[in-house]
Amino acid sequence: MTKSVAALVAILRETRSLIARPGADSCWSGWRTQAEALAEFDGLIAELEAGRLPHWRDIWVLFAGAGPVQDWSIDNGWGEAFIGLSGRFDEALAGVYPEARGH
């Protein structure tokens, strides 16, 4: 696994751990349940760790403004943390997918 992919996986894992907090509310995120959200992160992490790169938009859309992770973060009290997390995510995504720069 390249350093760039490892950085992206680390951010996905960090986000997953925030989503996995007990008592989470998925109301506005687009995911019906916490388990559904976690399964999506698990799938993306497994793909990247296996050396397969999902299309960059499949990952980017999760962290987009008003996207599911931002909505989840606001609903569950870590909206401020999302701002830093999303900045690091953008950098990591561009390191793996140069074509994603500026999106």
Image: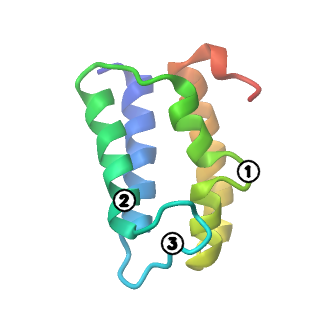
Q: Tell me the tag on residue 36.
A: 2
Q: Quadrant of the C terminus?
A: top right
Q: Are marks 2 and 3 in contact (CB under 8 Å)?
A: yes
- The amino acid beneath tag 3 is Ser
The quadrant in which the N terminus is found is top left
| Circle on res. 65 | 1
Q: Whole-Å distance between the Cαs marked 3 and 1?
A: 17 Å
Spatial CA distance of label 2 from label 3 is 10 Å
Residue 36 % position (x, y):
36, 59
Q: Is residue 34 left or right of residue 84?
A: left
Mark 2 in CB contact with mark 1 (< 8 angstroms): no
Q: Label 2 is placed on what type of residue?
A: Glu
Dot 1, how many residues are within 10 Å of its Cα: few (below 14), some (14-19), or many (20+)? few
In the current view of this chain or complex, which residue is farthest to the front?
32
Residue 98 horizontal/vertical position (percent): 61, 15
Q: Image quadrant of residue 14?
A: bottom left
Q: Within 10 angstroms of label 3, few (less than 14), some, or many (20 or more) residues?
A: many
Quick one: label 2 or label 1, which is nearer the N terminus? Answer: 2
Residue that lies at the very extreme toward the top in this rendered image: 99
Q: Residue at x 52, y 33 (%)?
A: 58
Residue 83 shown left or right of residue 56 in the figure: right
On the image, the x and y values in percent for residue 38 come to 35, 58
Of badges 3 and 1, nearer the viewer stands: 3
Q: Nearer the viewer, residue 45 or 29?
A: 29
Between 63 and 39, the one lying in front of the other is 39
Q: Amino acid at mark 1?
A: Gly
Could you say where residue 54 lies in the image, as x and y percent from the top left? 42, 24
Image point (45%, 66%), residue name: 32
- Residue at 57% over, 67% down: 72
Q: Specify which label sits upstream in the sequence, 3 or 1.
A: 3
Q: Secondary structure at mark 2?
A: helix
